[in-house]
Image (cartoon, rainbow, N blue to C red):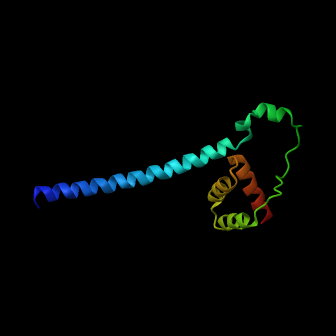
Amino acid sequence: MDTTQMVAVIALVLSLLLLIRVISLQGQLNILRADLERLESRPEAAGLSITSASASMPAAAPQKIQHPDRNMELDNRLRILLEEGKRIQAIKLFRIERKVSLKEAKDYVDELEELR
């Protein structure tokens, strides 16, 4: 192998490594964008603080979360994950689909698990 071929092979390997890194960074960027959209859609982002929102609401005893816009397709996907023992993946899926907090997602999956 002469020098030009060696340089060409090294350049090819480096370009493949860079391509893999770019793809990885793009995935991380997509995750950050989803997190940003989720955070911007929260009530605190609309000018309400947690303290002002909670101060205007009366204290109530904990109860099951009511979801009037329950998505049966999503529920079925969550049930399948729960049956496979993939509880954490079910919580992650619900958080992504509904753009809710970790606690809300966990409570929803817990409620869904109780209904099984």
Tell which of 52 and 15 is nearer to you.
15
Please determine whether, in this image, residue 58 is positioned above or below residue 95: above
Image quadrant of residue 54?
A: top right
Tell which of 49 and 58 is nearer to you.
49
Residue visible at 63% across and 46% down in the picture: 37
Residue visible at 78% across and 31% down in the picture: 51
Q: Position of residue 95 (x, y in %)?
A: 67, 53
Image quadrant of residue 98?
A: bottom right
Q: Position of residue 72 (x, y in %)?
A: 76, 66
Residue visible at 88% across and 43% down in the picture: 61
Image quadrant of residue 57?
A: top right
Q: Position of residue 82 (x, y in %)?
A: 68, 64
Please determine whether, in this image, residue 116 is positioned above or below residue 23: below
Quadrant that contains the N terminus: bottom left
Q: Position of residue 58 (x, y in %)?
A: 89, 37
Quadrant that contains the C terminus: bottom right
Tell which of 75 and 62 is nearer to you.
75
State left or right for residue 95 relative to residue 2: right
